Image (cartoon, rainbow, N blue to C red):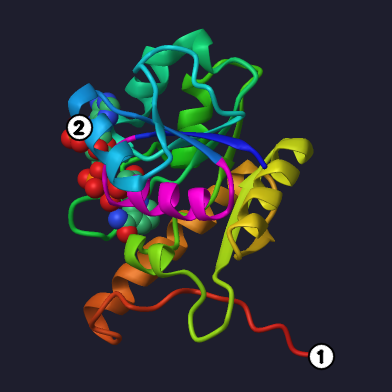
Amino acid sequence: MSSISIVGLGNMAGALAGRALAGGHAVEIIGRDPAKAKELAAALDGATVGAAGAVPAGDIVILAVPYGSAAAVVGEYGDALRGKVMIDITNPVNADFTGFVTPEGSSGAQEIAKAAPADAHVVKAFNTLYSHVLAAGPAEGRPLDVFIAGDDAQAKTLVSEFIESLGMRPMDTGKLPMARTLENAALLMLGLVAHSVNHTNFFLGINILD
Ligand SMILES: NC(=O)c1ccc[n+]([C@@H]2O[C@H](COP(=O)([O-])OP(=O)(O)OC[C@H]3O[C@@H](n4cnc5c(N)ncnc54)[C@H](OP(=O)(O)O)[C@@H]3O)[C@@H](O)[C@H]2O)c1
């Protein structure tokens, strides 16, 4: 069992918190509006509420805010994130879904890592799962694939164990710069929604053939 802190009170925060509680983890919810955080924690049954800007209780801190707020939120926590394993779930896509708002040659995860304390370890994960798909869990008996990228092997092991405990399959894709590829996978999903699948009830998965 891990202890998980989730910063954000929206769709992904709720879905991840629900799955983490079902997986037997201690879950702390942190939002900028304490009343709203309390409301979400009460709805989740078993989650606690943490104070924004204070040291999160979790060994793993999931950043479940829009990319546009992410670096500022990380900056607000500052040293409170020292030594934490941080999961970046953001998709830094532009308004018309044709590209990214991040600097050329970087990724959302790398920009977030720059804003974090040097000894925090950022792992990209969960960005290719729609919140309702995540909340629903295994699809037709098949575990959801969660692609991860990160530089620190121990942090990736911890995140992989967390993903497995949620009944999902971690798929390591390499070091943190691979986050850009995972963010491109989210663009792929948006393209599929707009041009062929026409809804969001699907997930990207890997079929491994013998
Ligand atoms: N939705 C999906 O299916 C999905 C899938 C994969 C990845 N993602 C990524 O997951 C992240 C969260 O998405 P979401 O759909 O959960 O968004 P959401 O429902 O809009 O929730 C965003 C949350 O972030 C909080 N927030 C925004 N700015 C903040 C700030 N400066 N300080 C503190 N909290 C702040 C909001 O707080 P308030 O409640 O106070 O407004 C809200 O609770 C995004 O980066 C998105 O790209 C989403």
Q: Which residues fall within the magenta stretch?
A: 8-25
Assess whether residue 12 is covered by the magenta stretch.
yes
Q: Main secondary structure of the magenta part?
A: helix
Q: Which of the 4 image quadrants contains residue 152?
A: top right
Which of the pair 175/152 is nearer the observer? 152
The residue under the point 70% across, 37% down is 155
- Residue 35 shown left or right of residue 124 in the figure: left
Determine whether 140 is above or below 58 in the image: below
Image quarter of residue 163: bottom right
Counting from the top left corner in percent of width and height, residue 130 is at 36, 64
Identify which amino acid the numbered label 2 is placed on: Lys
Q: Residues within 10 Å of mark 1 (few under 14, many from 20)?
A: few
Label 2 crowding class (10 Å Cα cut-off): few <14, some 14-19, many 20+? some
> Which label number is shown at residue 145?
none
**Looking at the image, is 209 positioned above or below residue 115?**
below
Residue tagged 1? 210
Going by the picture, which residue comes out furthest to the top?
A: 79
Q: Earlier in the sequence, mark 2 or mark 1?
A: 2
Which residue occupies the foreground of this view, 54 or 175?
A: 54
Mark 2 = which residue? Answer: 36
* Residue at the image point whose x is 56% and y is 84% from the top: 141
Question: Where in the figure is residue 96, as x and y percent of width and height?
Answer: 18, 58
Quadrant containing the C terminus is: bottom right
**Which image quarter holds the N terminus?**
top right
Question: Judging from the image, what secondary structure is the residue with disc 2 in?
Answer: helix
Q: Amino acid at mark 1?
A: Asp
Q: Does residue 205 appear to the left or right of 208 in the view shown?
A: left
Q: Is residue 92 visible?
A: no
Q: Is mark 2 within 8 Å of ligand 1?
A: yes
* Residue 91 placement, left or right of 182: left
Residue sticking out furthest to the right: 210
